[in-house]
Image: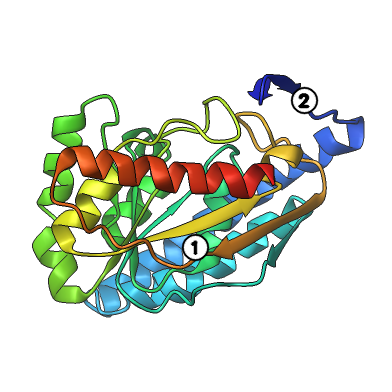
Amino acid sequence: METIAGQPHTTSFNSIDYIRSFVGTILIFVLLALVTVVVIIGVFLSFGKLTNWFINNLGPVFGRTALRILGVKLEYDKMEFTPDIPAVYISNHSSTLDLFIIISAGFPNVRYVAKKELQYNPFFFILGKLTGQVFIDRSNREKALSRIHKTYDSIRQKNLSLFIAPEGSRKHELPVGKFKKGAFFIARDLDYPIVPVLIKGAIDICPGGSLLTKPGKVTLKYFKPFPIESKDDKDLDLQIEKVRRFYIDKLTN
């Protein structure tokens, strides 16, 4: 049970939800295994030239299919921005479904900055290594930033974008947890804008740490970029809090 504005946040599930989620989880892992095989073959045969194609096309197909298997309909709210430039994309994070929602979004030429624990899943480990995703140790800030710094030259040369969930974990006080600074340091270093992406509805149908899910709808919306203008850390802290308050306002109003 988590908290929204001081009130308990719970979702009730019936036996059908448990059965659907159990079967759905198995099917998603089978689908993930098939995707892994396709990517292994495609990346090796193309000498890595199809990496962005797989991320831009196969990734969203996998994400949307996984959501459909769980009975989740993904809709796009009225967009304020079209993701067509190199940027640091961020989103709120409070549900296991967010992984599939973000993959479904299809950010162009994106690399995901993800917790190292995802590598314990052999499929995510293989896919991450083949497609250049960035796994970091969230418990060691300096080590995590050092790991990302090593990717800067490649990111600039290839005009890649990055995606980071600044809350770091879905386990936090709701509606929005405290933002870690990494995404904003990276945006400043790369001279990239921060593009806020809002996920609504996911926690209402999948609030736990598993894929136990009720059928329902989630919405996704892109907002106008926030340029990171300050070179001073104190001013940057104010900008970070401004973006966080932006999310709180959108989720509570």
Check the picture and name the quadrant holding the N terminus.
top right
For the residue pair 244 and 51, the one nearer the viewer reads as 244
Q: Residue at x 28, y 60 (%)?
A: 130
Q: Is residue 150 above or below residue 207?
A: below
Within 10 Å of disc 1 (Cα), the crowding (few <14, some 14-19, many 20+) is some
Q: Is residue 128 above or below residue 76?
A: above
For the residue pair 2 and 40, the one nearer the viewer reads as 2
Horizontal side, residue 157 vs residue 37: left or right: left
* Three-letter amino acid code at the position of disc 2: Thr
- Evaluate whether residue 165 shows in this view: no
Horizontal side, residue 109 vs residue 123: left or right: left
Q: CA distance from mark 1 to mark 2?
A: 34 Å
Look at the numbered disc 2 and give the secondary structure of its residue. Answer: loop
* Label of residue 35 in the image: 1
Look at the numbered disc 1 and give the secondary structure of its residue. Answer: helix
For the residue pair 39 and 210, the one nearer the viewer reads as 210
* Label of residue 10 in the image: 2
Horizontal side, residue 148 vs residue 93: left or right: left
Horizontal side, residue 25 vs residue 13: left or right: left
* Three-letter amino acid code at the position of disc 1: Val
Q: Position of residue 194 (x, y in %)?
A: 35, 59
